[in-house]
Image (cartoon, grey):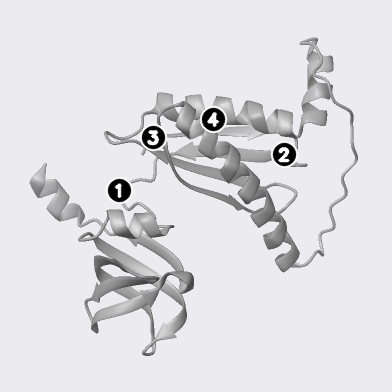
Amino acid sequence: MASCTHLLEPRPFRIIHSLLEGNGVSSGGFRAHFFFWGENREDVAMANESIAARVQELAERVAIDHGLELVHTEVAGPENKPIVRIFIDKPNGVTHEDCSAVSTHLGTILDVEDFIHASYTLEVSSPGLERGLYKRADFERFAGSKAKMKTRQPIDGQRNFRGRLLGVDGNDVLFEDRTNGQVRVPLEIITKANIEVDVSEELRRS
């Protein structure tokens, strides 16, 4: 899986480092930010979602500029040291150069926007063989593929599904589960889904 990881500091700290190293100064003022170790996990999750939404918007533009598909964006980890993950793809698969170019371009924009007020790690990578499924178009595109899904609420007492993705009908994903046969799963209650690859079968094909 092609990937590129950069550890980035908030802009005020990069300015200080530039001064110490004699590399010049970027415009911008220093701002103090305070983090409380006892803060509610739900508050951190909401803050991460807000950051992720903005990163998603910017990453979409960067991906398009480089002729790539933005598969997914997520922000994980604590608010004082988040990890920003970007997954990109293209028909013949992404290269390390693709990941590096997107990482550099997006990192520059995030530096200018300056809305992540902590040292953070920016990870740009391909989605891998067991690509995650995040939006309606993903479930339509990969109809016929083997997949796994997990739901927020149980359907007939079941929350974990494993089998074959059949497609989408209305707001429901049609899924052929190995255990219970065909089921309809509302898109809004799917918390995790991804393509499932049979490694032995792939080795035989290659």
Q: Quadrant of residue 42?
A: bottom right
In the rendered image, which residue does mark 4 sit on? Answer: 103
93 is higher (above) or lower (below) than 178: above
Q: Amino acid at mark 2?
A: Ser
Nearer the N terminus, badge 3 or badge 2? Answer: 3
Looking at the image, residue 72 lies above or below residue 61? below
| Three-letter code, disc 4 | Ser
Q: Are marks 3 and 4 in contact (CB under 8 Å)?
A: no
Classify 10 Å Cα crowding around label 3: few (below 14), some (14-19), many (20 and above): some
Point out which mark residue 129 bears: 1
Q: Where's residue 125, x and y in %? A: 44, 38
Which of the 4 quarters of the picture holds residue 77?
Answer: bottom right
**Label 2 belongs to which residue?**
119
Sequence order check, earlier mark of 3 and 4:
3
| First along the sequence among labels 2 and 1 | 2
Closer to the chain start, of discs 1 and 3, is 3
Label 3: which residue? 2
